Structure formats: C-alpha cells, structure tokens
C-alpha cells in the first residue's frame, strides 16, 4: 500500500514540475523582452522543481504595468 502512495506522489510531483516548467517557458518567451531574463526564468523553472514555477508566478509576472495599461496609463510609462 505504501509503495502505491509513493509511486502516485512521484508521478504527481513530476507532472507538476513538467507542466510548471513548460508554462513558465512559454509565458517568459512570449512576454519578456530581455533575453537574459528569459534564460534566467527558464533555468530556475527547470532546475528548481515546483518552487521555480511558484517563484515565477509570484515575482516574474509584471502585474503593475499590466494593471496600469488597463487603467489607461500606458502612455505615461513610455
């Protein structure tokens, strides 16, 4: 019984790592402007299993600029 639980957690953790890394890679490539930032975020997501994706979710997505653009302050930032 304990062996099955171990196998299931391994599969769930591996799937979360792969899906998170792919999501971070796609989002960083499509949204980031600086190639150094893209490489750094992809490396963090690939090397730090779920923690890298969670860090990108918390710190990597620029919500301030997006919020300002929705409020019509896009011209002031340029």
Image: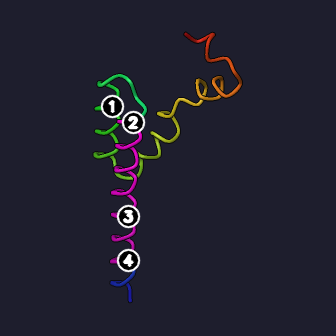
* Residue under numbered circle 3: 13
User: Spatial distance from mark 1 to mark 3, Cα to Cα?
Assistant: 24 Å
Principal SS element in the magenta part?
helix
* Residue under numbered circle 2: 30
For marks 2 and 4 on the same chain, the one whose residue lies earlier in the sequence: 4
- Does residue 66 show up magenta in the picture? no
Farthest-out residue, right = 71
Question: Are the two marked residues, 1 and 3, in contact with CB atoms closer than 8 angstroms?
Answer: no
For marks 1 and 4 on the same chain, the one whose residue lies earlier in the sequence: 4
* Residue 15 in the image, given as x and y percentages of width and height: 36, 64
User: Spatial distance from mark 1 to mark 4, Cα to Cα?
Assistant: 32 Å
- Give the colour scheme shown: rainbow
In the depicted view, which residue is nearer to us: 28 or 53?
28
* Residue 23 in the image, given as x and y percentages of width and height: 40, 49
Please name the residue shown 28% across and 39% down the image. Answer: 43
Nearer the camera: disc 1 or disc 3:
1
* Residue under numbered circle 4: 8
* Residue 75 in the image, given as x and y percentages of width and height: 61, 12
Q: Which residues are magenta?
A: 6-29
Regarding mark 2 in the picture, which secondary structure is present there? helix
* Residue 50 in the image, given as x and y percentages of width and height: 40, 52
User: Spatial distance from mark 1 to mark 2, Cα to Cα?
Assistant: 9 Å
User: Spatial distance from mark 2 to mark 4, Cα to Cα?
Assistant: 33 Å
Describe residue 23's horizontal placement relative to residue 59 as left or right: left
In the depicted view, which residue is nearer to us: 50 or 69?
69
User: Spatial distance from mark 3 to mark 2, Cα to Cα?
Assistant: 26 Å
For marks 3 and 4 on the same chain, the one whose residue lies earlier in the sequence: 4
């Amino acid at each position: 019984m304990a062996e099955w639980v171990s196998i299931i957690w391994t599969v769930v953790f591996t799937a979360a790592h792969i899906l998170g890394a792919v999501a971070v890679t796609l989002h960083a490539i499509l949204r980031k402007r600086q190639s150094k930032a893209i490489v750094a975020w992809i490396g963090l997501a690939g090397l730090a299993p779920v923690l890298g994706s969670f860090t990108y979710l918390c710190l990597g997505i620029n919500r301030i600029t997006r919020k300002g653009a929705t409020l019509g302050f896009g011209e002031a930032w340029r």
